[in-house]
Structure formats: structure tokens, C-alpha cells
Amino acid sequence: MTMLPKEAPPKRLGLVIDLDTCVGCHACAVACKEWNTGGAMGPLSDIDPYGAKARGSWLNRIHGFEVGSGHEGRSVYFPKSCLHCANAECVTVCPTGASYKREEDGIVLVDEDLCIGCGLCAWACPYGARELDEGSGVMKKCTLCVDRIDNTHLSEDERLPACVSVCPVSARHFGDLADPESKVSRLVAERGGFDLMPETGYAPTNKYLPPRPKRDSIGEGAPATLEPVSPEGGFLGWLDRRLGGA
Amino acid sequence: MHPTFSIIFFTSTSGAGYGLLALAGAFGAGGLLPPERGFGAALLGLALALVSLGLIASTFHLRHPERAWRSLSQWRSSWLSREAVAALLTYLPALAFAAGWVGFEAIWGWLGILGALLALATLICTGMIYASLKPIRAWHTPWVPASYLGFALMTGALWLIALLSAFGVQANGALALALASSALAWALKAGHWRHLERAPNPSSPETATGLGRFGSVRPLDPPHTGENYLTHEMGFQIARKHAAKLRRLALLFGLLLPAGLILILFFAEGWWTVPIAFAAAFSGMLGVVIERWLFFAEAKHTTALYYGERRA
């Protein structure tokens, strides 16, 4: 049923992504693709994978942005996947009931047997988190790896989304954002975690942690400026004059 | 947004069909149309053919058309589902109305009115599918269902005068209706175009990434080297000058040409009014198809903000 749950789910499972530590290695995207192209949710099709126009579905994509300029300028790697919004209109626009939001933990999923591949839910998502699989003709999206986190045959520490367990710099955190005491909620509170495009009113569950402020000095005891490279006298001065320096 | 041919064909063809059905039901019930069996057959036959052709075309963009029946289930939340339900419900009174008119030469007015109301409801649902999408600012406005309704009535009225002329009926009232509905449709479209220029635009790459506090956000490394579903579907771009040219073409075929031909019909008599009236209808349809192509091509999705678009 594509109505949203009547009451807010008791749990809000989601990701917290640290834009300060992400190094843009794409390991999370690759691990996601690897896990989700197999199992119950697979395949995650590639079309013409070795040809000139290779393309395919991915549930997680890593953008790189250049932000600000001058002293405040920086490059930021920006992983983007489904944000499992509280007001997930991708769910309510679905005409068949294929898209739904799990009542127990708020995860947004697609029942692929009901999906007609009309693409309307992808239009309704402001973030571009849903991709139609050209191979199977149904909509694909991040499931938070429900087939890992729900799988009691895995050991407790393995019940994580594939992207989270693979991240080499621990820039991705998974947990219950409805519980203010959870590790992810504390991270969001401490680091000033924020929503993407809050103006759309979708109330995403996933949060992003901002890059930390830049340091103004390079630390205790370091010289304020570099030493001049063309001293007046001595060997270096002679060399500099020989080489035609100013 | 990527203009998909099957959706453009569906909305313009079914739109004309529902418009014609609504006019046939309302004016038939009011006793303003020729009651002959032949005219009823042509009128309702054409309306239902246009509706059905469009609905069949609409399934072509589905990757699993064999599951299309499932789209009747979620009418409580989904405008697309409501459209499907309304579209099928419309057949019931429309077919019964046609059976009465063609089979018994009896115009059952209340069935005509019911069919007209359901046809209008279907058109509003179609417009609301687009108007309900918040990520597409160009569509998230009441101007969208209003102009869908306007164009359906306009093209319906153009087909009505074409059929009337084919049956040798000189009906100045219908000609005036076609002129008025054309003016109304394009006035609503002008309102929509004005809205596109002026509506506030709160989303930007800065809000999309939440990084605006550090300054402007520019794309550096794209996440993929080739095209993907998102860039194909939502990254469609059209140059402003091309859009302006196409708007002029849409107005030429959709308004000026049919209006000019209708003015001739006010004073003309004889067999040659038939090709003129049909030319007006085809021209109007062409204008609406160009307008519908632009409706998609000019609309931007917030996803494009992640790919270098400054405003969506």
C-alpha cells in the first residue's frame, strides 16, 4: 500500500555521512553494486558494460564538488543514495503499491513484482535516488541492505549496509535516528548534521555531517612566513645572482 | 525533463478525446447537437477512438505493461492511479450514452452529463500527476491541470466543428465555442509560461548539498563517466532560443492558424468547408503536441542541481 505509515515508525533507520572524512574513493558505491547485483534484489543491470556506451543502475553515487574559493575553498566528496525520507512522496505517487515505507523502521523499499516501471517515483524524488533498471524494467533504490541488516544468520557486527562496512575511513554510519541516544544521533548532534534540500519538505532520514572548519595556523612553533629563498650573500645569494634572480 | 513520445501522444490524443466526449455529453444532453444516429456514431466513435488510442499509447512507456492493471489499486494516494480509475470509469457512461444515441436514436442526457464530468475528472487527474511533483518547479502549479483542461476542451471543440462540417451542419455557436476555448487554453498556457519566469526558485546546488555555508558549489568530479538513467531522464536541456522558437510555432499551429480557419468558416458554405474544418483540427493538434513537447523539455528537475545546473 502506497500510503505512508499512519504513525511515525518507532525506528528510523538511516545513514549519517561524514563529508569531512570522505575521500571519494567510491568503495561504498562498488560494495553497494557488488552486494545488490546478487541475492533477492539482483540483478542491478549494466547495459553494454564493455562497449562505448556503458551504463547501468547504481544505488549509490559519489559526486565531487568544488566549494567556496580562496582560503575557504575546498573540494568535497559527496556520496548520495536514498535518504529514506519521512515524507517520501516517491511512495505516495506509486500507482501500483510497489513502493512502500516499512512501518517498523521507515526503510523505503520497492516490491519489484508489483512495479510497472512507469518511472513516476523517480520523478517524485528530489534527490535522484531512484534508478530504473533497464535490464529488469523495474525501479531500483537503496534498501539499506535489508538482506544484510535483517539477516540473523550473519554475526551482529556484519548486519550493516555493505557501503558502511566497506568504508575505509569510517565516513558512513548506520543506525536509528529516532533514538536520541544512538551513536548516529549523537554524531548528528555533536557535528551539526544537516538535511539535504530541506525546502522540499521531504524530511530525509539520512543526515550529512559538514566538513570541519579549516585551521587558521599550521600549529605551535611554526614560523609565520616562509624564509626568503634568495638571501643577499653567501653561496645561495651567489647562485641566485648567477641564475638571474631578482 | 526528457520528452517521451508515448506520453506526449497519450496526453494530447486522449486529451482531445476527453474534451470531445465532455462537449458531446454536455451539448448532446442540452439538445444542441444533431440527434441523428450517424452523427452520434461519428462523434462518440471519434471521441472514444482518440481516448483509447491515447490510453494504449500510454502503456508503451511502461517497462511492464502486462502489470498495468495494478495501477487501479492506489487511488487513495496516487494521482496516476486516480487517472487510471477515472479513465476506465468514463467508459461506462460514455459507452451507454453512445449505445442510446446510435442504437435507439435516444439521447440519454444524464449519461452524457455523467460521462462529461468523468472525462473532466480524468483530465484533472492527468494534470495533477505533474502538478503534484514538488521536485519539478515548472510543473508544481495549478496552471498545469488548468492548461491541460483548456487544451482538451480546445482540441475537443476543433474536432466537434470538423464533424459538424462533415455532416453539413453550419453551427456558428460551435465555431464561437472553438474560438473561445482556443483563446482560453492559450491564455491559461500564457499564465503557465509567466509562472515559469517568475515563480520563486528556492533550490540550488548549495541547498542540494547543504554546503552553501562555505560558498558557491560547483561540480568537480562527476560520479560517472557516461550517461545514466538520471541524466537521461532529468538532465534534458533545451536552449532558450530554441524554446522561444518552438513557443512561436506552437502558437502559430495551435492558435493563429485554427482561429483564422474558423473565421473563414463563419462565412463559408459548401463542401470545401470540410477540409478547412479538418485542417483547423489537425493544426490545433499539432500546436498542442509542440506545446506538450515543450512542457517536458523546459521543465527542470532538482536532481540536475547535482550535475551542474544552477537552478531547477
Image: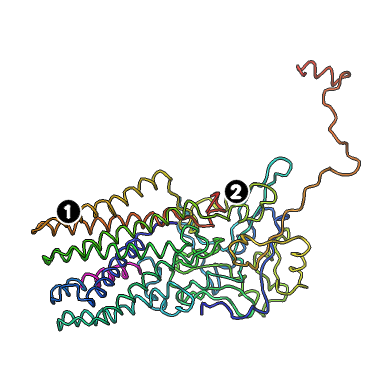
> Looking at the picture, which amino acid does disc 1 mark?
Ile
Circle 1 — which element?
helix
Q: CA–CA distance between discs 2 and 1?
A: 60 Å
Q: Position of residue A124 (x, y in %)?
A: 51, 65
Report whether mark 2 lies on the same chain as mark 1.
yes
Which numbered disc, 2 or 1, marks the residue that appears first in the sequence? 2
Residue at the spot of label 2: B221
* Of the pair A155 and B134, the residue shown nearer to us: B134
Chain for disc number 1: B
Q: Position of residue A69 (x, y in %)?
A: 68, 42
> Does any portion of residue B172 appear in the rendered image?
yes
A73 to the left or right of B18: right
**Above-or-below relation of B245 to A224:** below
- Give the magenta-colored segment's residue range: B45-59
Report the residue at 49% width, 59% height from top.
Answer: B136
Question: Would you say the magenta stretch is mainly helix, strand or loop?
Answer: helix
* Of the pair B62 and B196, the residue shown nearer to us: B196
Which image quadrant for residue A159? bottom right
Chain for disc number 2: B
Residue at the spot of label 1: B264
